[in-house]
Image: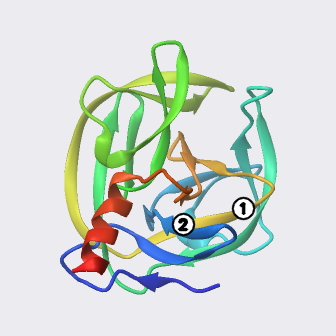
Amino acid sequence: MGIINLPSPNDQTGAYYPGRNGYNYSSCFSAATSILTPDGSKRISDLKKDEILYSWDKASGQLLAHTVKELRVSEGPMALTKVSHQHGAIEATGTHTVLVQQGKKKVWREVSELQKGDVLMVWQDGRLTPSVVTGTDDLGPQQVYNLDIEGGDNFIADGVVAHSYAMMPKGRRFSGVRRLLRHLSS
């Protein structure tokens, strides 16, 4: 399964590739993003197939070890957003979904939807911890990376619980997918 970049340099928000149940709209990270592994943090761009990383398990609230199936690398640069928060920062495409706290619930939200005051969920000191967003900045287009994980759907990226992809399920569209569909229909 390869990556097909968006056809227009004017909408460099993610990558589009065939998935199991339709299409995945790939959302990605900068090369320097640190991924939590049993051996400590490792740059996403350095991870290889069959390496072990950690995913957050909703049922137990703990980290579970999962295997990297594939490192996805964009064929061209894509626009990144830097989201600063109380405990650090993360650089991702706007379509990437991260775990946030809304009231008492934990839900997935796209990076492009995050605003100052939103609460990201980060893995810190052996537990899931809320971290308030302090700001966002557009970083411009860069080479980006994402992971396909065996048996898991998220990983810890720069401390933030991040989904490994954004599915386009029937009847539901993420904002980045709407932009892609508008572009493809024009």
Q: Indicate the quadrant containing the C terminus: top left, top right, bottom left or bottom right.
A: bottom left
- Residue 185 is marked as none
Q: Answer with the quarter of the image where residue 114 lies.
A: top left
Indicate the colouring scheme: rainbow
The residue that disc 2 covers is 146
Give SS at disc 1. strand
Q: Do the residues labelled 1 and 2 touch (CB within 8 Å)?
A: no
Against 165, residue 163 (above or below) is above
Is the residue marked by circle 1 packed among few (<14), some (14-19), or many (20+) residues within 10 Å? Answer: many
The amino acid beneath tag 1 is Ile
Question: What is the x, y in percent for residue 174?
Answer: 40, 52
Direction from residue 40 to residue 12 in the image, left or right: left
User: Residue at coordinates 57% horizontally, 49% vertically from top-left?
Assistant: 163
Against 113, residue 7 (above or below) is below
Q: Indicate the quadrant containing the N terminus: top left, top right, bottom left or bottom right.
A: bottom right
Is the residue marked by circle 2 packed among few (<14), some (14-19), or many (20+) residues within 10 Å? Answer: many
Q: Answer with the quarter of the image where residue 146 lies.
A: bottom right
User: Residue at coordinates 33% horizontally, 70% vertically from top-left?
Assistant: 181
Q: Nearer the viewer, residue 20 or 85?
A: 20
Direction from residue 76 to residue 182 in the image, left or right: left
Give SS at disc 2. strand
Question: What is the x, y in percent for residue 143?
Answer: 37, 76
The amino acid beneath tag 2 is Asn
User: Residue at coordinates 48% horizontally, 21% vertically from top-left?
Assistant: 130
The residue that disc 1 covers is 149
